[in-house]
Image (cartoon, coloured by chain):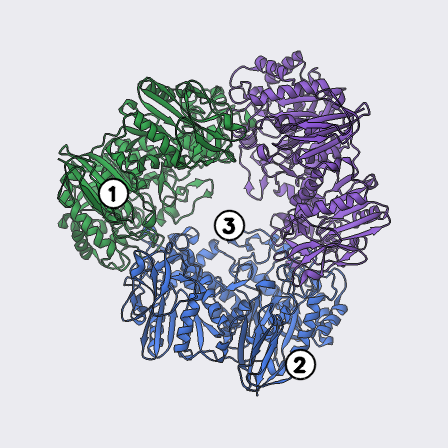
Chain colours: A purple, B green, C blue
C-alpha cells in the first residue's frame, strides 16, 4: 500500500433496494478508497449446501474497480448459514451455558470437523473466485475470532491430549496444579474430568490458555488456505478485537494476540469507544498501541464507529479528531463499520456513515473532509514509525488467574491496566505493548507491568535483569505472586522480583478503611482511596514512595522503589486511583529521561508523534475537549500540514473544540 | 344482566372445614350477588383420568341458587392435574428456560394435542353438567390465558406453516426481514431454524405475533365448545389481564386483546393496583378503558383486590372508592379475588375479603356498604355509556419491537404509554383505547399514539388522513420508524407521518446531558429531564413546541406541531417527564375543543362521566387523597346518588379522605 | 480429653515440598497439640478404584505421635475422586440447577448407592488402618455435611415413601397441604409429582424437612461404621456449620442440628466471622451457644479462621481475643483452618496460620502466646459449665416456610434471629438454643422465640404452659401463624398463643410509612424504623408496650405483653431495629430476675461466665474494641488467670485494644 486507506464495510447483500452506483458516487465524494465485503454473508454466497452464488461479490468488485476503490474480501466464516446448522447441529458450540442455538454469529465450535469442512470449502470457493480480480488488495480471515467458550467433549479430548503433551507425568501435573486439594487428583488420563466444573484455578487457567491456542490454530489454518490463492501485492489480515465492555476496553482475554497475529501480513483491529462528552481518545491510542506492537508495524483499523449508537453519534469535529488519532498511533487505514445503517435484525441501532435514509448527513459531510485530507496528506502521514521508550507488559495468564479468584479478591486486570495506560496516555508518554515472551526488553527505558499475577521464573528474572541493566520497571499489585501454573510461590512475596524491588511481604489485607499517603513521593493532589486489597510491604534497601494510613497497617509501605545503578524497580502493593499511578510514572519517567517537551502538554491536549517515510518528525496535537484553547508550539519550526502554514517554535496554535494540528518538523 | 353484579371468587374446594352456609350468610349480608367458581380446580373435578366428580360444584350451585346468588362457572383448564402431567409430560410447555416442571399453573403448551384433548373433555363434562342450573349466568373460559412462552418443536412447526402462508416467497421473506444479515438467510423452508436463538428483531417480532395468535385461537376454540352448551341468557366471558409489574401496569404483550375478545359475549378482566398511600385510581381507569374498548361495551371486573398483599390492604374508604371507580369506567360487575384467604400453598398472602380467620373485619364491613349501595343504585349506575372524544392507539407489535431493541435503546413502551395515559387521566380527559386495525378514527377528536415503532403504511396513512380531516394526533417518540415487519423505513424519519407532523430527522442521540426547553409551548412547571434517546428534529412548516438544551443539539426541535385545516399532528421526539406530556395534551385538547368543566378539576380530584340507561348524565367525582377537600359542583343541577340530596350547580361538595360523590344530572 | 486442645487442620498431601519435621517444630513452638487430617483427600488415599495408599496418613500419624500431638482423622467422603465421578457419574447430585459437574467438593448425592458403597469402603479401609494408632484421639465423620440440594428421581422416590408413611391418607395430605389449590391434588401415589416445581409452601416445607433427614440418616450411617473401629478413649465428632453468608451467620437451614448431632460423642463445628474493624464476637458466641446446646456439653471448634481472607487477617490481639472467646462459650478445642496457606486451587486466599511462605509471621507469633496460655491454664479453663437462664427457641421449619414466602413477604428468619440474639449478647445475657422438640423448658426463666411461623399445637401449648408456670416468653413476628404443615391457622391470630400474649389480629400491612412508638415501654433511644410487614395488634387484657405511628394504623399495638402470675408472654408484631428488641429484653429480663452484675457492662465489654471443673466461677471479660478502657471488677475477689494477679471486687481492670481478662472467683 502506498497511500492511506479510508473506507467502510459495505454490504450490498443487506440493501433494501438497488444502490450500488449511488453508493459509489457518495463514496467517491467522501474520498473513500476502500471497502470490506463478504465477511458475514455466507448464506448468500452458499444458499444451499454446495451451491455457490457470488453475484453480489462480483458486481461489487467490478463496480469498485471501475471507481478506483480497493476491496478487502472477508472469509464469511464467522456466521454460519441456517442450512448448515440444520444439517450439522453439532457445529453450534457447547459452552458452560449448554448447547448453542442458531441465530447469533460466532456461535460455532471452531474445532468442529463439520464446520472446518464447510468453512474450508466456502473459503476456497470464494477466494479462488476473487483472487485475480484487480480490485482486491487483501483478505480478512474470519472476523473477531474467539473461542466462544467451546468446551464440549471433543474439545475436552483435545485438551487432555494437550495436557498429556505438556505434562507427561501425572504426578508432576497433580503437584504443579495442587490437585490433591479437595480430592481432585487425576490418577489416570482416562479419568481426566471436564474442566467445566473445575474449582482449581491452575487447571482453569491452563484450559483458558488452551482455548486461546484454539484461536491461534484456527487463524493459522485459515491463513494457510487463503495464502494458497493470495496474489502478489495482496495481503492477509485479521480484525482483532479487545475486551468488550460496551466498547474496546482492554486486552482480549480470549485470544493471544501476539501468537495469533503471526500468520497475518498486516495486523488489523476494530476500535470502538465512548463518544460525545465521554470522548478521550484513550481507546484509540490503546487499541492502536496494542495492534501496532503485534507486528511492530503499521496496522489497519478495519472497523471503527461512524455514527453508531445514540450515545456515540459524534459531535461536530469528533469524527475528524478520531480519524487522525488513528493515524497518529500508526494506522495506515481507517475503515468505518459501516457504510450504511441496517434496516433489520440486531445492529439496526449501530449506525453507519449514512443513516437509514441513505442521505448525506453531518457525519457523512465531515467524513468528506477527512477523505480529502487523507488523500492530500497521504505521503506525509502514511507509514508513521514509532520508537517508544516505554512499554506495558501484559499477560493473559494473569488476567485469567485474577478473574478466577474474583470471588474472593476483586482485582480487575484490565481496569488496572487501563488506569496505568491512561495515566501514561494523559501525560503524553507514548508506549508499546509487549507480552510475556517479548525479547529485547532493552529497547525500552521504562516497562510498566500491570498485575503480573502468573509468571514464569524466566520472565521475572528477565525483568530483574532489565532493571539491573539500567531499565526502569514499575510493577502493579500481585506481580510475581504465582508461577506460570498459577501456583503461589513458596517464598517471601513478591518472590523473584522482591530483591530487585527491595520489598517483601507475607500478608495482604482488606483495603477498606485504608488510604495511601505520601512517602518520599509527594502525592499531593492525588486521590488517596484504595480498593480491593493492600499488601503490607516491608522495605529492604528501598525507598518508601508511599505508605498506608491505618491504625495498624500504617507501619507498612504501599509503594517501594529500589535503584540499582541507573535502573530502578518500583513495586505498587495496592490498587490506588489513576492519579497515584500518574505520580509514580512521572517520577520514574523523569529518572529514565523520558520527560520532554511532550510533557509540557497534558490531557485534554494529547500529543502523538512519529517519523514519516520522508524521515521527518510528525507531531499530532489533539484537543480532546469541548473548550477552545491556545497552546504554544512546543516543537521546532514546522509545517502545519492541515493548513499548510509554517509554525515557528513557541508560536501560538489555536484549537477549536475537538480540533487538531499536525506538525511536520522541518 | 339487569343489575350491577358484586361478587367474589369462591373456592369451596380450598376450605379447611365446612363453611358453605356460613359463607353464604356473610355474602348476603355484604350484598354479594355473584360468585365465580371452578376455574382452577380441575384436579378436584377430575381426580383421575376420566373420573369426574362435580360434588363441590353442585353443592355450591344449589346453595347459591337458594340464596339468590348468581354463579359464573370457569373452565378449569389453566392448571392441570398431577395425573395429567404424569401421563403426558409433553403437556408442560418447552420455553426459552427449557422444559417446564409441574407445580405452577399456566405451565402448559396450549397447542399440545394431549392438553387439548383432556381440556376439551373436562370442559364438556363440566359445562354440560352445569349449563342448565338456574344459578349459572355465564362462563369464564380459562383464565388470564397467555402463550406462556411455548416454543417447542411442535410450536415451531406451526410457526413455519404460518410463515409460509404469510410469506409465500422465501426471497420476499429474506428481504423483508433482512435475513442476509449475519448469514441468517433461510433458503429452504425445511431449514427454518427455531426462533428461540434468533437475533433478528423482525423474525422475533413475527414470532411474538404468532404466539399471540395462539392465544386468540385457543380462546376461540374454548368459546366454541362452551357455546354448544350455553343457554339463553347466559354469557361467555374471559378474564383478560394486563402487563404485570407487581400490578396491572399496561397493555398485555402476550395477547392481542382486540382479536382475542371477539369470541366472548362480554369482556372481562382483572385489575390489581397499588394501594394505601400509592392509590391513584389510574390502573382502575386504564384497565377499564382498555377492556371497555374491546367490545365498545360495558364489561366485567372479574377479579380485583380485596385485602390482598400487606401493601394493598385498603385504608378506610379505599375499597369503596375503588369499587365505584370501576363502575365509573363502565364496569357492570366488581368481583373480588377472592372471598376468603387461603391457608396453604402460594397465594396465602394474597388475602380475600375475609382474613384467614373467616371473621368479618374492616374490609368486609366496608364491602357491606358497597354491596348495599350497588343494589340500591343499580338502575342509576348500570350500563354506563361513554362517548369519549380522545383515544390512545396502542400497538403490541411496537411494544415487542422496542423490547427486542432494549439492549441498545431503553424505551419501555408501556412506561411511556402510562405516562401519556396518566397525564390524560390526571387532567380528567377520558379516553378509549384503539388498536392498529381500528376503524372509524373519526369518532375521535384527539388520538394519542404511544411510540408506534412498527406500523404499516396503511395505518400511518390513515392517521395522516385523520389529521387532515380535522383530527388531532399526538405521536410519541419513534413513531413511524419501521414498517409492520420491523424494517426501518428507508426515508427521512419519521417517514410517512413526517409531512403531516412537519418534521424530519435522520439522527437520534443519547439523552444524557440533554434537557427540554420551551418553544412555542410554555413548559414552565414541567420537569425538563429526558431519558433514553432524543431525536434531532428539524421542522418543515411546523411550529417548534419545544427544543433541546445542549451545546450541539440545542439547534434541533424536540416537539413539533403542524396544523392542517382544523386538525393538527404533533410529534414528540424524546422521552420527557409526564408533566411535559400534560402540557402538550392540554394545548392539543384545547385546540380540539376537549377542554371543559371536567378540567376545572384535576388529580387528586378525578371525574369520570357517562350516560346511564335512563339517558341521564352521571358524573363520578373521586377524591384520590388522604386529605379532606371541598369542591364546587362543576355541573348543573343534579342529584347526588349516594346521599340522595339535590345539588345545585356550583354548590359545595365536601369530600372526606378517599371519598366520592355521584352526580346524576337532572 | 483432659486438656484444652489447640490445633490446626494439616494437609501433608498439599505440601509443595517436604515439610513435616519443620512443621511439627513450628507447631510445638506454638503449643499446638492437635491436628485434623485426611478429611478431603480421598483421591490421594484411593488413587484408583480399590487401590489404597495411606502413606501420607501413616507418616503424619507417626510424626505427630512422636511429637506428642494428637490427631483427629476425618473420613474423606465429602470430596470424591475423579475416577469415581468418571465411573459413576450418577453420584453427582441432580439439583434444581440440573445434573452436577465434577470439580467442587460436596457435589454428590448422599443417597446414591454407588456413593455409599465407595464411601463405606474408604471409611473402613482408612479407619481400620488408623484406629489403633496411639496418635489418634478421635474421628470426624465427613465434613459440613448437607443435602446439597439433591432431588433427582431416586430422592423423589424416597420422598414419596416418606410421605406415604407420614400421611397414609392422600385425602388427609391434600387437605393438610391445601393441594386442591391450582389443581395440585395428588390423587394417587403413583402420580406424586417432583417437588422441584412445586409452588405449594407446605409441600416444599415438608421436602426440606425430608432433605434434612437425609443428612441425619447419612451421619448416623457414617457414625455406625466408624463406631465399629473406635477404640476406648476415642471419640466421634462432626464439623457442623451454620447458615453461610460469607461467614457463620445463623442456624443451618439444610441440617437439623439437634437430630443429626445425636450420633456423635462430642459436637463440633466451624465458626468463621467478620474481623478487623468488624469483629464483635457475636458469631463466636452464637456458634458456641448453638453447638454447646446440641449435647448440652462442651464442644470442639474444629475450624476457625487464622489469617483467612484479606478482610479477616486479624489485628494484633484479635486472634487471642477470639481463641479465649471460644473457650468462654464452652469450647474445649480451638482448631484453625488451617495450618498453612494453600498454593493452588480454590481456597488459595483463605490463609492459614502460616502464609504461603511458611515463615512465622505476626499471626503465628500471636498463636504461640495462645498455645502457651492454653497449656498453662488448661485445668482452670477446660470443661466450662454453663447454666443459662435464657434460651432462644429456633425452628428450621419456620425458617424454610418464611423463605418460601419471601416473594411476597420479606422476613429473613436468621436476620431476625440474629437481631434478637445480638441484642442479648450485647447486654451480656448468655443463652442456650433449643429446638421445637426441647423438653424441660422450665430450666429457663426467659425463652426468646424468633418468628415461629410454623409450629404444632403441642409446641405452642407447651410455650403457653411455660408462661403460665412463671416463665417469660418473647415471640417474634408471625409466631403461631401456621401449623407444622405450614397451613395458616383458621383462627384469630396469633392463634394458640393469642390468649397468653393477650393479643389478636387479623390484618397485617406494609411497614412502609409506619414507625414504632413507645407504649408502656419507653423506647427512647431506640430506632423507630420498621421493615417488611406490621401486624395490627389489638390488646386483650395485655399491656401495649409499643404501638405504631401512622394515620390509620396508629390505633393498633405493635408489641403487647400479658402477665400471668409471675410469668409473662410478650408478642412483637413487627420487624423493628435491634435496639427495640434490646429494650424489650431488658424489661423482660428484669421481670425475670436475670438482670445482674453482668449487665453493669455492655458491648463492647462482653462478659461470659461458667463454672470450671474445680467448681469455681470463671468470668471472661472481653474488650471488643480498638479503644483502651478501664472497668471495675464487677465480681468478688478473684484471680486474674492470665496475669496471675489477685483482683478485689471493684478493683480497676485495664484493657488494651482487643484485650481480655479471665477472673476465677475465689
In the rendered image, the vertical position of residue C348 relative to residue A260, given as above or below? below
Q: Residues within 10 Å of mark 2 (few under 14, many from 20)?
A: some
Q: Which mark is residue C97?
A: 3
Specify the subunit that label 3 lies on.
C
Label 2: which secondary element: helix
In this rendering, which labeled residue sits more in front, label 3 or label 2? 2
State the residue in front, A245 or B165: A245
Local secondary structure at mark 1: strand
At numbered mark 3, what does the secondary structure look like: helix, strand or loop?
Answer: loop
**Residue under label 2:** C376
In the picture as drawn, the residue positioned furthest to the bottom comes out as C666
In the rendered structure, the answer to whether residue B63 lies left or right of residue B118 reads left
Going by the picture, which residue comes out furthest to the top?
Answer: A66
Residues at badges 1 and 2 in contact (C-beta under 8 Å)?
no
A592 left or right of B508?
right
| Mark 3 vs 2, N-terminal side | 3
Looking at the image, which residue is at 82% across and 51% down?
A563
Amino acid at each position: 500500500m502506498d497511500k492511506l486507506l479510508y473506507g467502510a464495510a459495505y454490504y450490498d447483500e443487506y440493501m433494501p433496494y438497488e444502490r450500488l452506483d449511488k453508493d459509489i458516487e457518495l463514496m467517491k465524494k467522501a474520498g473513500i478508497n476502500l471497502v470490506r465485503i463478504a465477511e458475514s454473508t455466507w448464506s448468500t454466497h452458499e444458499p444451499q449446501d454446495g451451491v455457490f452464488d457470488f453475484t453480489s461479490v462480483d458486481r461489487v468488485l467490478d463496480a469498485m474497480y471501475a471507481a478506483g476503490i480497493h476491496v478487502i474480501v472477508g472469509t464469511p466464516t464467522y456466521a454460519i448459514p441456517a442450512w448448515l446448522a440444520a444439517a450439522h447441529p453439532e457445529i453450534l458450540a457447547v459452552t458452560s451455558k449448554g448447547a448453542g442455538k442458531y441465530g447469533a454469529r460466532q456461535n460455532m465450535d471452531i474445532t468442529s470437523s463439520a464446520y472446518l469442512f464447510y468453512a474450508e470449502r466456502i473459503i476456497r470457493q470464494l477466494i479462488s473466485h476473487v483472487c485475480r480480480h484487480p480490485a482486491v488488495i487483501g483478505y480478512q480471515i474470519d472476523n473477531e475470532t474467539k473461542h466462544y467458550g467451546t468446551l464440549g467433549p471433543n474439545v475436552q479430548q483435545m485438551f487432555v491430549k494437550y495436557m498429556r503433551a505438556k505434562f507427561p507425568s501425572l504426578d508432576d501435573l497433580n503437584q504443579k496444579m495442587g490437585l490433591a486439594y479437595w480430592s481432585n487428583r487425576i490418577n489416570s488420563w482416562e479419568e481426566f474430568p471436564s474442566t467445566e466444573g473445575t474449582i482449581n484455578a491452575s487447571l482453569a487457567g491452563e484450559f483458558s490458555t488452551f482455548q486461546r491456542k484454539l484461536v491461534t490454530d484456527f487463524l493459522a489454518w485459515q491463513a494457510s488456505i487463503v495464502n494458497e490463492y493470495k496474489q502478489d501485492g495482496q495481503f492477509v489480515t485479521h480484525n482483532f478485537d479487545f475486551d468488550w465492555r460496551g466498547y474496546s476496553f482492554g486486552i482480549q482475554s480470549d485470544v493471544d494476540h501476539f501468537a495469533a497475529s503471526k500468520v497475518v501480513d498486516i495486523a488489523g483491529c476494530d476500535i470502538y469507544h465512548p463518544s460525545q462528552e465521554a470522548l478521550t481518545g484513550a481507546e484509540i491510542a490503546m487499541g492502536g498501541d496494542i495492534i501496532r506492537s503485534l507486528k511492530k508495524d503499521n496496522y489497519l483499523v478495519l472497523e471503527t464507529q461512524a455514527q453508531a449508537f445514540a450515545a456515540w453519534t459524534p459531535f461536530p469535529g469528533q469524527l475528524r479528531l478520531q480519524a487522525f488519532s488513528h493515524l497518529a498511533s500508526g494506522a495506515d487505514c481507517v475503515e468505518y463499520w459501516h457504510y450504511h445503517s441496517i434496516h433489520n435484525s440486531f445492529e439496526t441501532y449501530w449506525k453507519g456513515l449514512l443513516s437509514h435514509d441513505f442521505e448525506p448527513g453531518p457525519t457523512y459531510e465531515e467524513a468528506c473532509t477527512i477523505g480529502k485530507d487523507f488523500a492530500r496528506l497521504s505521503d506525509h502521514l502514511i507509514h508513521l514509525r514509532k520508537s517508544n521508550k516505554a512499554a506495558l507488559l501484559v499477560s493473559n495468564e494473569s488476567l485469567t488467574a485474577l478473574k478466577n479468584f474474583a470471588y474472593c479478591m476483586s482485582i480487575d486486570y484490565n481496569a488496572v491496566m487501563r488506569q496505568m495506560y491512561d495515566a501514561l496516555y494523559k501525560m503524553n508518554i507514548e508506549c508499546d505493548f509487549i507480552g510475556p515472551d517479548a525479547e529485547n526488553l532493552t529497547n525500552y527505558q521504562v516497562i510498566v507491568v500491570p498485575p503480573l499475577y502468573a509468571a514464569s521464573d524466566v520472565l521475572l528474572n528477565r525483568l530483574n535483569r532489565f532493571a539491573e541493566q539500567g531499565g526502569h520497571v514499575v510493577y502493579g499489585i500481585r506481580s510475581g505472586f504465582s508461577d506460570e501454573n498459577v501456583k503461589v510461590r513458596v517464598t517471601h512475596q513478591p518472590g523473584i522480583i522482591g530483591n530487585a524491588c527491595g520489598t517483601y511481604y507475607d500478608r495482604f489485607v482488606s483495603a477498606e478503611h485504608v488510604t495511601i499517603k505520601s512517602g518520599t513521593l509527594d502525592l499531593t493532589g492525588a486521590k488517596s482511596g484504595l480498593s480491593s486489597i493492600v499488601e503490607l510491604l516491608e522495605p529492604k534497601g528501598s525507598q518508601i514512595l508511599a505508605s498506608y494510613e491505618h491504625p495498624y497497617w500504617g507501619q507498612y509501605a504501599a509503594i517501594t522503589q529500589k535503584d540499582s545503578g541507573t535502573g530502578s524497580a518500583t513495586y505498587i502493593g495496592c490498587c490506588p486511583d489513576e492519579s497515584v499511578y500518574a505520580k509514580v510514572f512521572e517520577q520514574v519517567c523523569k529518572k529514565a529521561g523520558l520527560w520532554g517537551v511532550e510533557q509540557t502538554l497534558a490531557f485534554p491536549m494529547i500529543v502523538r508523534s512519529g517519523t514519516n517515510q520522508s524521515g521527518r518528525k510528525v507531531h499530532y496535537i489533539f484537543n480532546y475537549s469541548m473548550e477552545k484553547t491556545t497552546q504554544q508550539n512546543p516543537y521546532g519550526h514546522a509545517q502545519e500540514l492541515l493548513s499548510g502554514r509554517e509554525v515557528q517554535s513557541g508560536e501560538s496554535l489555536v484549537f477549536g473544540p475537538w480540533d487538531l494540528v499536525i506538525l511536520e518538523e522541518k
